[in-house]
Amino acid sequence: MRVDIRLEPGCTEPRLVLITSAVTPELDTLIRSLRTGRPNMLVGFRDGVAELIEPERILRVYAASQRVYCVTDTGEYTLRLRLYEAEERLDKQAFLRISHSEIVNLRQVRRFDLSLTGTVCVVLKDGSTAYASRRYVSKIKDALGI
């Protein structure tokens, strides 16, 4: 993507113009983030302290026992969001839902084991594993281009 910035001394309000032949998923994500103005960072809670969590640090986000958790390279945090709300804040190009209750960061995946019948085992860079449900196998294969 090419980005051009033109400075005009008489400009009173910034204006953004996108010139494209088609709206790609990348542009769609950019447009939504500009419209909402929400940061794509998550706020996690651990030991009574709230911390900003940068998406690059996230390994996975999952729901269990009526709570949503975020696992990072520095540990596990509790989120005060529903899973779908966390999914909306995260980049669709980097994060993939692998089951009804789990989202993984594709940049933190070491490998996908497709040898199991009907399911996919996801091995993350920290050595932990997650399992994709059968319902999501075709979506995972589409996202990976296989």
Image (cartoon, helix red, strand yellow):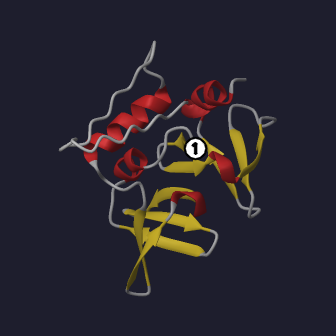
Q: Is residue 82 above or below residue 88?
A: below
Of 16 and 79, nearer the camera is 16
Q: Is residue 125 above or below residue 15?
A: below
Q: Is residue 18 left or right of residue 75?
A: left
Query: Residue 66 at x, y = what percent?
Result: 36, 62
Per the image, label 1 sits on a secondary structure element best described as: loop
Q: Which residue position holds label 1?
A: 94
Q: Is residue 88 above or below residue 134?
A: below
Query: Residue 131 at x, y = what percent?
Result: 65, 47
Residue drawn 34% across and 28% down? 17
Q: Quadrant of the C terminus?
A: top right
Q: Quadrant of the N terminus?
A: top right
Q: Is residue 68 left or right of residue 36?
A: right
Q: Is residue 24 above or below residue 76?
A: above
Q: Hey, which residue is sitting farthest front in the picture?
A: 9
Residue drawn 66% across and 27% down? 141
Residue 35: image quadrant is top left
Of 133 and 97, nearer the camera is 97
Query: Residue 86 at x, y = what percent?
Result: 40, 53
Residue drawn 38% across and 26% down? 18
Number of callouts in the render? Answer: 1
Residue 132: image quadrant is top right
Task: Note whether residue 58 is visible.
Answer: no
Q: Disc 1 residue type?
A: Ala
Residue drawn 26% across and 42% down? 14
User: Crowdedness of circle 1 by 10 Å Cα count: few (<14), some, many (20+)?
Assistant: few
Task: Note whether residue 84 is visible.
Answer: yes
Q: Hey, which residue is sitting farthest left in the picture?
A: 12
Q: Hey, which residue is sitting farthest right in the picture?
A: 115
Query: Residue 69 at x, y = what percent?
Result: 47, 65
Of 118 and 92, nearer the camera is 92
